[in-house]
Amino acid sequence: MDVASDRVNRVHASRLRLLKEMQERSALRELSTKEAQRHRATLAVQNASQGLAIAQQHCAGAEAALYQELMSLDTLSSAALDHHNLHIERLAAEVTSRRQMLDDARIAQEKAETAASETRALWVRRSAARHKWQQIEDDVRRAVDIHSEAAGEIEADDEILLRYGRVSLALMSDNQVR
């Protein structure tokens, strides 16, 4: 079985884990920025929507008042009619402008949501990579510790064998001489 921790030494695993941690933190900062932009875009849509509603109400109220005034007048001069018509056109232009602002805000919100979603996906990938390299580093550390412990035990066993092996050889040679 091909295990990544068998191909990587402890120092490289640690460095790669640190790199992955830095990349994850960077992605998290970027995600935070994108989420803030998304939130601002959402607020802009709400504000633009409220602005449009207010402009539409203002326009409707002004039109109703102007039409009431026109109905109450017995004689209507062309100058008064032009003045009222110009006022209604200005209000309609304001409503159109507010509607365009709302459309622009919605487009910006969609872009911000897309950017936040893409950044979130990037952060998830980088987080998974960091977890993977953390696991590899832990596996390498365990393997090195096990290897060191086994080497220490072998060294202790060899030392005991050498010490008692010489004594027993010396005892055997003494026994053979007698």
Image (spheres, rainbow, N blue to C red):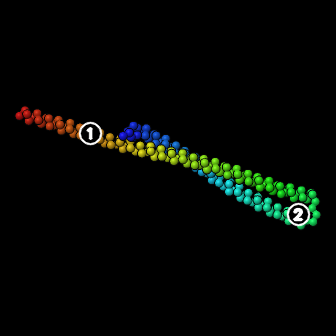
Question: Which residue is depicted at the point 52% across and 43% down?
Answer: 23
Marks 2, 1: nearer the viewer:
2
Report whether residue 161 is seen.
Answer: yes
Question: Which residue is depicted at the point 70% across and 50% down?
Answer: 104
Q: Is residue 23 left or right of residue 44?
A: left
Per the image, label 1 sits on a secondary structure element best described as helix
Task: Give residue 165's position: percent from left, percent from top.
Answer: 17, 37
Task: Give residue 9's position: percent from left, percent from top.
Answer: 40, 38
Numbered circle sitting on residue 154: 1
| Disc 1: CA contacts within 10 A as few (<14), some (14-19) or many (>=20) | few
Residue type at the position of mark 2: Leu
Quadrant of the image occupied by residue 162:
top left
Question: Which residue is depicted at the point 44% across and 45% down?
Answer: 132
Vertical side of 130 occupied by 170: above or below: above
Per the image, label 2 sits on a secondary structure element best described as helix
Asked whether 15 or 72 is in front, the reply is 72
Vertical side of 40 occupied by 153: above or below: above
Q: Residue furthest left?
A: 178
Q: The N terminus appears in which quarter of the rendering?
A: top left
Judging by the rendered image, the residue that carries numbered circle 2 is: 70
Asked whether 76 or 49 is in front, the reply is 76
